Amino acid sequence: MLDQVGTPELDLELSNIRERVKSVINDDEWDFYKSDIEDVLRLKKEKNAIILGHNYMTPDIFHCVSDITGDSLALAKRAMDVDADIIVVAGVHFMAETAKLMNPEKTVLISDPTAGCSLAESITADDIRKMRALHPGVPVVTYVNTTVEVKAESDICCTSANAKQIVESLGVEKVMLFPDEFLAQNVAEQTDVEIITFPGRCEVHERFTGQQIKLLKKAHPDATVLAHPECPPEVLHESDYAGSTADMSRFVEEQKPKEVALITECSMSANLVAEHPETNFIRSCNLCPHMQKITMENIATALRDMTTEITIDPALAAKARQAVERMIAVPLNK
Ligand code: 13P
Ligand code: SF4
């Protein structure tokens, strides 16, 4: 625990948070996290910092200290409106890079810079240049789950929330949609635009199978199955709905299913349980080892020591930013 003196305001904030998360954080867990939560809340105030928490963060981070939560699209967009000097990204490295791209004048921190992503690691800037040479004139759409170097070589970015719209917004017959092979195949099934794919995969979502979903539905015939579009197409064929992490949250919020299975990272269900006590969540999920590297303890240390700061070469950032800005300019019709 860091040196600190509690204040009545902090005590009140903590007790309000405790009340809110009672259904997802038990007393022992609360005792374990409490001093770090206290430190993070205090340091945020002292340093005028905010925390962007991805939907895959564990409930302690997601519910107790995050100021903005959401999918990668929401975090990329909302990071731009924040009135703070410091942004701590509770998510993986590409998310912190995107936050820095959109907020070059702010200090952006990630509490474990080794929190990567198998998709971001699957493709390099050189791969994009080679693919452009193979397919001259075909625009390159890259998933935000990529490095800044890859974004800088791209025409426009997309996320799982807007991939189809971004592809169609270009008004061309053919695009390259990299690097998630399954996302690209899933989008290709919904559009007339021809899509060239790349063999990148999310190590969490590629493990789900159509057979698994069939068995799940047999065991839970009343369950609604929601799957992330990084899953193989056969998984989406067996599911009732496909969407980004924010789309899945929205679905649960609006449809209020009695029983639901979220075919994605495990923390999604854990986070939604607190807001939807009326819904039974079937835990058929996989853990992302990269997201799991972000902990309450290392967030407290990051804020105290101002580590690890994301820095991007300004010329590279300018090119990469264009691809993200073009994406944000495409209206999302949801
Ligand atoms: P979302 O954009 O749906 O939040 O997905 C990000 C991610 O890393 C999924 O694996
Ligand atoms: Fe990357 Fe998959 Fe982890 Fe998301 S869940 S950060 S896509 S490895």
Image: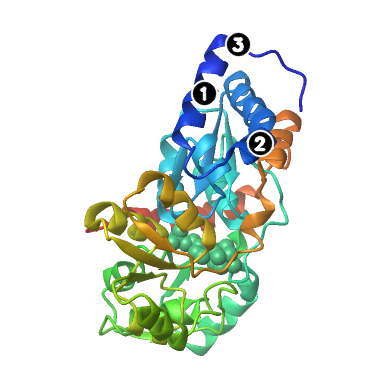
Q: As drawn, which residue projects farthest toward the top?
A: 8
Q: Quadrant of the N terminus?
A: top right
**Where residue 33 is drawn, which disc sits there?**
2
Residue bearing the label numbered 3: 7
Tell me the element at label 3: loop
Q: Quick check: can you spot residue 5? A: yes
Say whether residue 199 is left or right of residue 329. Answer: right
Q: CA distance from mark 2 to mark 1?
A: 13 Å
Q: CA distance from mark 3 to mark 1?
A: 12 Å
Q: Earlier in the sequence, mark 2 or mark 1?
A: 1
Residue bearing the label numbered 1: 15
Q: Quadrant of residue 166?
A: bottom left
Which quadrant of the frame does ligand 2 lie within? bottom right
146 and 11: which is toward the camera: 11
Residue at the image point whose x is 41% and y is 73% from the top? 229
Residue at the image point whose x is 33% and y is 59% from the top? 247
